[in-house]
Each structure stands twice: as structure tokens, then as C-alpha cells.
Amino acid sequence: MNNDALMAHLHEDVIAMQATALAGGPDLDRAVPTCPGWTVTELLGHLWVIQTWVQSILRARELQPTPQAGPSPVADFIDGIPDFLTAMRAITADEPCWNFGPEPRRAGWWIRRQAHEHSIHRFDLGAALGSTPTVDAALAADGVDEVLSVFYPRQVRLGRIEPITETIRIAADDTGDEWVLGDGDPVASVTADACALYLGVWKRRDLAAVARIDGDAAAVRRTLGVALAP
């Protein structure tokens, strides 16, 4: 997915969450079932922290300290949106900039990362408020690719998980995208629509329960039980 499309999705999701924040009221105290321990207020505060952190990285082009949420996280989130979107639109994709992806590290990497940061948290917000926003199939497929090509190797590199030993083929039956997780010949395949796969690899759904599994179902459950994304 190109950066223009990713930016369009990011803008849509940020504005939708801004509308929820502006509405306020008792909804802000609701628990977020897909983020155990968080309320809507804490979810919006988390997004403000991420947005502020990313802006500081884009300015310095180097890793920066993570800010702390203040006493008014919802107001901070609302007030910070114009500057955040301006900073994201101003990115020159090929400029060198720190990120936690593979080399070469470029500023444009943050467009993809923030598109998915906000997409998955918009889903979380919907889960808290009793709705289930639909994730565009192309965006969802790109998000699966990000988890498998960026987060999984990063988790292994940091020693948070062991490399997967049972190779699994993952296929999106609506977009035609396919991935192979692990090395060697697949022992099983997991097939579902891209949105289900996206929410599954981000631990928002039990993928094994909604996907079609062919081959070694036990291997699929073991593999999908690994924390591919943080």
C-alpha cells in the first residue's frame, strides 16, 4: 500500500477518534475489552503519547524519550491532532530517520506504522463503545504484512520470543495475499479474509476460531499463540 493511501486511512481514523473524544461523557470511562486494564481515556492518552513521541522523532531524526501522559489525556489528544497530522503530511519519505524497522531507516516508515497504530486502536475504541469498525481489506493485508515482516523478526531479535519452528502459510482469501511464517515447507495453512487475519495477528480475535485451517491444526495453534506483535 502506498503512502498516500496509508495517510488517507490515518486521517480518517484520527478524525473518527477525535469525534469520540469530543463527545466525551461517560463513554470515556468505559473499559476497552481488547486492551485489558485500559479505559477509553487511557486509550486516547496512549495515542497522544505515541503521536507526541513520533513528532519528536521526526523533528530530531533520532530516537527520543517517550513522553508521559499528563493529567488531561483526552484534552491533550484532541489539542494535539492538528500538529500530529501536519507533521505526518510533511514527511519526506526517503529522508533518513530513526525507526525500529529494518535498515535502511527512512522517515516514510512512520506513515505505515502510524496508519496501523491508529487503525487497530480505532477497532479497540469501537469494541469499547459497542461497535465494530470495518477495516479496509487492502489496509488489513498491509497490516498483516507489517506484523510478519517487521514485528515478528523484531520480537525474535530482542529475545522476546523464540523463532517459530513450525512453518505456517497464511492466506487472505479476499485480497489474494499470502505469507509464509517460518522457514521450510509449511505444515499447515490458515485462510481467512484480510480483516480477520489482521485482527488475529494483533490478538484482537481468536484467529484459529474464525479461519479455515488445513494441515496440522495443533501447529497452527502453537504458532498463533506466539506474541508476534507487542
Image: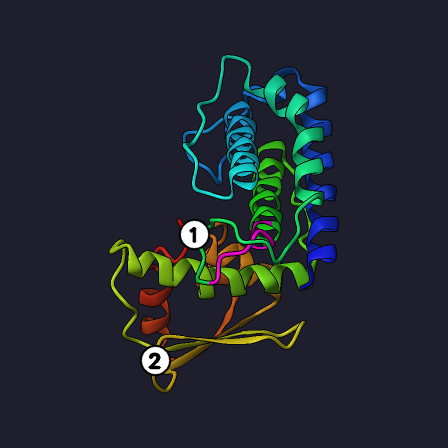
Q: Is residue 105 magenta?
A: yes
Residue found at the very far bottom of the displayed protein: 185
The dot on residue 183 is 2
Give above or below for 212 relative to 52: below
Q: 214 or 149, which lies in front?
A: 149
Q: Amino acid at mark 1?
A: Phe
The residue located at (46%, 37%) in the rendering is 35
Q: Is residue 152 magenta?
A: no
Horizontal and vertical percent position of residue 27: 62, 22
Q: Secondary structure at mark 2?
A: loop
Horizontal and vertical percent position of residue 69: 48, 21
Magenta part of the protein: which range? 104-110
Q: Secondary structure at mark 1?
A: loop
Quadrant, the N terminus: bottom right
Mark 1, other Cα within 10 Å: few <14 / some 14–19 / many ≥20: few
Q: Earlier in the sequence, mark 1 or mark 2?
A: 1
The residue located at (47%, 50%) in the rendering is 99
How far is mark 1 from mark 2, CA to CA? 23 Å
Q: 138 or 187, which lies in front?
A: 138
The dot on residue 100 is 1
Q: Amino acid at mark 2?
A: Asp
The residue located at (52%, 68%) in the rendering is 211
The secondary structure that dominates the magenta segment is loop
Give above or below for 222 relative to 204: below
Q: Are marks 1 and 2 in contact (CB under 8 Å)?
A: no
